[in-house]
């Protein structure tokens, strides 16, 4: 029996190898090569997503150089790049490496994590508005982080508490709409209600404590890159790396789960199991990002929107979302730092000012058949 | 007047009694160290100058303002729900209150600070917010989906809120003046503010009494209303103006308080049935009842300090919102 099967596969292989050169489907590049053992290998690369991702990456690099250069001490790009590697004047090396680089890294990581979490959850819920920020996960994480600050003082605890809060809020929202499915606006409004409750709890805790403790918790309520903890950033970096790898694994099932549940089951996807895993991934990414930057979950709406409008709809645009989320976050923080120079606008406010009209525009647009 | 013909014989006296009781409790209980007994003797006219100051100068205006704000927000919510035919339409959720708050913040940044100016400015801002909201309900596909409208309102008020906090970054004086007001609170308001509100509230009350009948005809649909001799467009504009005046006044004095305009008409409809003429009457006692109860809890729960009332209304109102949304079939108006 066994040999029979291997015979079959070998013969299929022979057939493949002997067939004339396979043409790539339109819109794809096909890379074919011979493996050392003499097998023919090929890889299909979607042309548009590659171009879009490369373009976004280049744009992100340019914006990063700008970000490192602009500020109260402006540096030309020709000074920034050597300073990045430790050459040039001491003061510019210090500014770039010690002051601006950690903040830039935090901005890139949080933007990428929010956008990746957003695209995962939107695909999962088949609802382009299902960002962690809108369905209340943000507020849950904030409430728990504030609780930790208010009660036990600043430590490693807020990030961990943010994780717990995000999981609680997600469980509540998904539990509340259990019968109705995650499609449609009811899901979103239920999440909005959960978020309102957690927002009120945050206010309640802030009202109970002394003013300086409340001030320490302030960045958590608007979203800012000022009050980041180094170990939270490190945790986020690890989490995002794991998240990207995991996203690579869930990419195929997730792109099939965009169809109806019945279709996905028919194509061999265990929808329930994958749904839980993807949801957990999205919640963990959001929580880690909130632990660094506070509630700026609107990035999770803007990033995937940009990525979707640029990429083709053949696959879920993970990479493009990640990059455009980072791009948006870096740009927003740059604007917040430089626009009103002596005053710094918290990045959460910049994002809300951009994201609010965007969300309204999505809502007001005449509905297409399937988003 | 054929307006008050529900079955108010049983429920209305009960509601009014409850309102009187809650007002009394609101006079007796507070965050300070004047306990219920001292307050009671002060009410009876004792010589305890501290207690009588607290009761008459602090708690009485506060109770009065709570009653006015509750009535205004409840009626405004019922009107807005009737005219947008949407059970989730609420001045706070849809951004009308945020419009008022934003307008006040702009006026303060420009250098204004007089109480009367603040009220008219808040009403203007509420008017603009209201017009935005109702023009949105006319967009095809959005108006017919109640839940989508709420989401649009949340986005709108989120935008206005972040613009407000952006302005506060510039101006420390304004930030100090507006910081506590933005959250919504009944504390520290004076009777002068109430007096300044009264004319516009009276005008709104007369207008609401006049449009209640056409509005209940509008519930049958625009064609039926036209057939009965009413002008749907005119009614709609009158309602917008009334809502703007009421919400603007309430916001000017107490800050943006969300969810009252959702819960109160909900309860009123449950008691009075679908006719807007009866619902409006029931909103009048239920609104103050809710605002005062929330305010009392806000005073007690974190004594000796106080909680902003907006926090409590959100804690009570958001579960109602979720429950309404969860219902398999949304109630239609």
Image: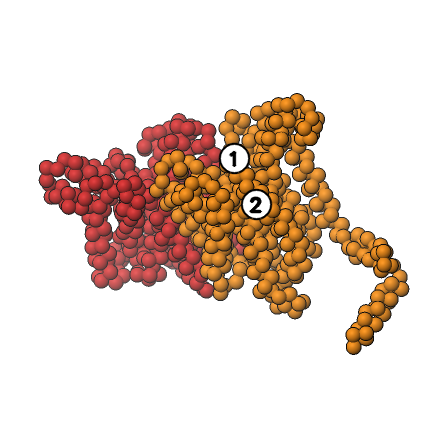
Chain colours: A orange, B red
Point out residue B41 in the picture as x, y percentages from the top left corner. 12, 43
Numbered tag placed on residue A226 in the rendering:
1
Q: CA distance from mark 2 to mark 1?
A: 17 Å
In the rendered view, does B206 fall on the left or right side of A296?
left
* Residue at the image point whose x is 48% and y is 57% from the top: A171
Q: Nearer the viewer, residue B11 or B256?
A: B256
Which quadrant does the N terminus of chain B fall into? Answer: bottom left
Task: Please tell me whether mark 2 sits on a helix, a strand or a loop.
Answer: helix
Residue contact between numbered discs 2 and 1, judged by CB atoms under 8 Å? no
Which quadrant does the C terminus of chain B fall into? Answer: bottom left
Chain bearing mark 1? A
Select label 2 or label 1 by which is in front. 2
* Residue at the image point whose x is 67% and y is 28% from the top: A86
Chain bearing mark 2? A
Going from the N terminus, do you reach mark 2 or mark 1 first? 1
* Residue at the image point whose x is 32% and y is 57% from the top: B268
Res B117 seen here = yes
The residue that disc 2 covers is: A235
Evaluate whether label 2 is on the same chain as label 1: yes
Point out residue B171 in the picture as x, y percentages from the top left corner. 43, 28
Task: Please tell me whether mark 1 sits on a helix, a strand or a loop.
Answer: loop
Pointer 2 local density, CA inside 10 Å: few below 14, some 14–19, many at least 20 = some
Q: Nearer the viewer, residue A365 or B200?
A: A365
Point out residue B281 in the picture as x, y percentages from the top left corner. 28, 54
């Amino acid at each position: 029996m066994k040999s029979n099967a291997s015979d079959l596969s070998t013969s299929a292989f022979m057939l493949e190898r002997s067939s004339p050169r396979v043409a790539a489907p339109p819109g794809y590049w096909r890379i074919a090569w011979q493996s050392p053992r003499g097998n023919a290998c090929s890889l299909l690369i979607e042309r548009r997503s590659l171009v879009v991702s490369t373009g976004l990456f280049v744009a992100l690099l340019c914006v990063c150089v700008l970000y490192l250069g602009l500020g109260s001490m402006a540096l030309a790009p020709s000074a920034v790049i050597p300073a990045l590697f430790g050459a040039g004047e001491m003061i510019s090396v210090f500014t770039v490496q010690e002051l601006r680089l950690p903040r830039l890294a935090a901005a890139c990581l949080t933007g990428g994590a929010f956008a990746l979490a957003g695209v995962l959850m939107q695909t999962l819920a088949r609802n382009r508005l299902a960002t962690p920020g809108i369905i209340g996960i943000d507020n849950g994480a904030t409430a728990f982080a504030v609780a930790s600050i208010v009660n036990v003082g600043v430590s490693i605890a807020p990030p961990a508490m943010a994780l717990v809060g995000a999981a609680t809020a997600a469980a509540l929202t998904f539990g509340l709409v259990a019968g109705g499915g995650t499609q449609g606006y009811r899901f979103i409004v239920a999440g909005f209600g959960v978020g309102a409750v957690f927002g009120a709890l945050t206010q309640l805790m802030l009202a109970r404590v002394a003013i300086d403790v409340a001030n320490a918790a302030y960045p958590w309520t608007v979203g800012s890159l000022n009050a980041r903890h180094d170990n939270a950033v490190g945790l986020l970096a690890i989490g995002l790396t794991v998240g990207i790898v995991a996203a690579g694994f869930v990419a195929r099932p997730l792109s099939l789960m965009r169809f109806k549940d019945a279709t996905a089951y028919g194509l061999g996807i265990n929808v329930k199991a994958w749904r839980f895993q993807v949801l957990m991934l999205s919640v963990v990414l959001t929580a880690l990002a909130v632990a660094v930057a506070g509630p700026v979950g609107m990035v999770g709406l803007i990033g995937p929107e940009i990525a979707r409008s640029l990429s083709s709809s053949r696959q879920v645009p993970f990479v493009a979302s990640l990059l455009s989320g980072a791009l948006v976050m870096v740009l927003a923080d740059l604007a917040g730092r430089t626009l009103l120079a002596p005053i710094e606008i918290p990045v959460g406010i910049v994002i809300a000012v951009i994201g609010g009209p965007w969300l309204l525009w999505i809502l007001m647009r005449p509905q297409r058949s399937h988003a | 007047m054929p307006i008050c013909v529900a079955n108010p014989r049983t429920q209305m006296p009960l509601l009014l009694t409850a309102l009187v009781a809650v007002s009394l409790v609101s006079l007796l209980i507070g965050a300070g160290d004047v306990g219920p007994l001292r307050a009671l003797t002060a009410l009876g006219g004792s010589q305890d100058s501290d207690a009588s100051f607290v009761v008459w100068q602090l708690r009485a205006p506060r109770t009065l303002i709570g009653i006015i704000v509750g009535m205004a927000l409840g009626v405004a919510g019922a009107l807005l729900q009737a005219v947008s035919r949407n059970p989730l339409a609420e001045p706070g959720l849809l951004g009308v209150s945020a419009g008022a708050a934003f307008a006040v913040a702009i006026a303060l940044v420009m250098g204004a600070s007089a109480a009367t100016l603040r009220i008219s400015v808040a009403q203007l801002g509420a008017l603009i917010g209201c017009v935005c909201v109702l023009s949105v309900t006319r967009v095809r596909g959005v108006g017919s989906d109640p839940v989508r409208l709420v989401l649009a309102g949340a986005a709108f008020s989120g935008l206005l809120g972040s613009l407000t906090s952006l302005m506060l970054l510039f101006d420390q004086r304004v930030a100090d003046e507006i910081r506590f007001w933005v959250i919504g609170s009944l504390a520290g308001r004076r009777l002068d503010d109430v007096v300044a509100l009264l004319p516009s509230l009276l005008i709104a009350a007369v207008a609401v009494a006049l449009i209640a009948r056409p509005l209940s005809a509008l519930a049958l649909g625009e064609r039926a209303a036209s057939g009965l001799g009413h002008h749907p467009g005119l009614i709609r504009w009158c309602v917008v103006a009334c809502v703007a005046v009421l919400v603007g006044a309430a916001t000017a004095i107490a800050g943006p308080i969300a969810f009252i305009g959702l819960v109160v008409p909900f309860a009123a409809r449950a008691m009075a049935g679908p006719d807007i003429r009866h619902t409006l009457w029931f909103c009048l006692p239920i609104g103050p009842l809710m605002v005062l109860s929330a305010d009392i809890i806000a005073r007690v729960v974190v004594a000796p300090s106080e909680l902003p009332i907006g926090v409590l209304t959100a804690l009570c109102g958001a579960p109602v919102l979720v429950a309404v949304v969860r219902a398999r079939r949304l109630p239609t108006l």
